[in-house]
Image (spheres, rainbow, N blue to C red):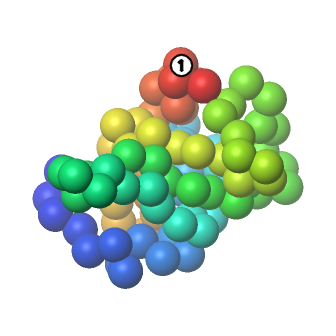
């Protein structure tokens, strides 16, 4: 995946690779020693069922390793997302 500025991620929608809308990016978590993104903090869409996924209050934690593409939407592999939960 090519390099992406964090500011370009702001308020992007997150979608699974099978076309399901997951939610909207609210923030990111980074490893302060390496500078790499660890998790995306996502506000889940009201239609997305969050059972079985990593949650922090009302926000969903999406491991960056599940991200497959960043364009108009951030596309994640729902299998990797669920497995890490």
Q: Is residue 85 above or below residue 38?
A: above
Asked whether, in this view, residue 80 is left or right of residue 35, the answer is: right
Is residue 76 or residue 20 the one in the foreground? 76
Which image quarter is the C terminus in?
top right
Q: In this view, does 10 lie above or below 68?
A: below
Name of the residue lying farthest toward the bottom = 7
Residue for point 45% across, 56% down: 29
Asked whether, in this view, residue 68 is left or right of residue 40, the answer is: left
- Res. 76 in view: no
Q: What element carries label 1?
A: helix
Asked whether, in this view, residue 26 is left or right of residue 30, the answer is: right
Residue for point 70% across, 60% down: 43
- Residue denoted by label 1: 83
User: Residue 40, percent across and down?
Assistant: 49, 54
Residue for point 53% across, 43% down: 62
User: Residue 14, percent across and down?
Assistant: 55, 56
Q: Quadrant of residue 30?
A: bottom left
């Amino acid at each position: 995946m090519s390099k992406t500025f964090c500011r370009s991620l702001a308020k992007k929608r997150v979608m699974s690779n099978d076309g399901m809308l997951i939610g909207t990016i609210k923030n990111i978590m980074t490893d302060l020693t390496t500078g790499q993104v660890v998790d995306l903090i996502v506000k889940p869409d009201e239609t997305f069922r969050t059972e079985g996924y990593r949650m922090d209050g009302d926000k969903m934690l999406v491991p960056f390793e599940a991200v497959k593409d960043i364009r108009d939407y951030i596309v994640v592999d729902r299998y990797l997302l669920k497995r890490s939960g």
